[in-house]
Image: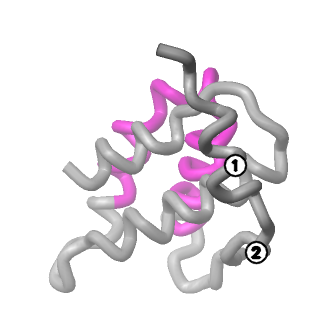
Amino acid sequence: MLLERTIFQLDRGPMPREEARQLGQLGYMQWIAGLPGNADYLRAARHAYDKAGPFMMRSPAVAEFCDLLLASIKQPLMPLQLAMPQRQRRGGANARRSSRMPL
């Protein structure tokens, strides 16, 4: 269930490379945090890659997520390059109000 939600959240279509990288990393962190403590990581990572794979061509964020999965499978003892996105103002309430579609 969490895997499907993560893929759904990442599957936003074309976007700038940096935004896709940040979203892919956040998706990976969300997915790994949702794994049970006794999970077989390699099996779970392969399953996640198989599920997300069909969405890679249309969504750069899903492709980044899959790249992280592959890197963790190929070299499981190497640290991954993960970072939280930099904090930035996104416009607050005014931006949310202006982005709403008229009824």
Q: Residue at x 72, y 70 (%)?
A: 85
Q: Residues within 10 Å of mark 2 (few under 14, many from 20)?
A: few
User: Quadrant location of residue 63?
Assistant: top right
The image shows residue 39, relative to residue 58, as above or below, that is below
Residue 57 shown in magenta: yes
Q: Secondary structure at mark 1?
A: helix
Q: Using the image as rendered, state which of residue 39 and residue 2 is in the foreground.
A: 2
Q: Using the image as rendered, state which of residue 51 and residue 85 is in the foreground.
A: 85
Per the image, the residue denoted by label 2 is 87
Magenta span dominant secondary structure = helix
Q: How is the image coloured?
A: one colour
The image shows residue 29, relative to residue 92, as above or below, that is below
Mark toward the viewer: 1 or 2: 1
Q: Earlier in the sequence, mark 1 or mark 2?
A: 2
Q: Position of residue 42 (x, y in %)?
A: 35, 66
Q: Residue at x 55, y 55 (%)?
A: 70
Q: Secondary structure at mark 2?
A: loop
User: Quadrant location of residue 59?
Assistant: top right
Q: Position of residue 83 (x, y in %)?
A: 70, 77
What range is drawn magenta here? 45-72
Per the image, the residue denoted by label 1 is 94
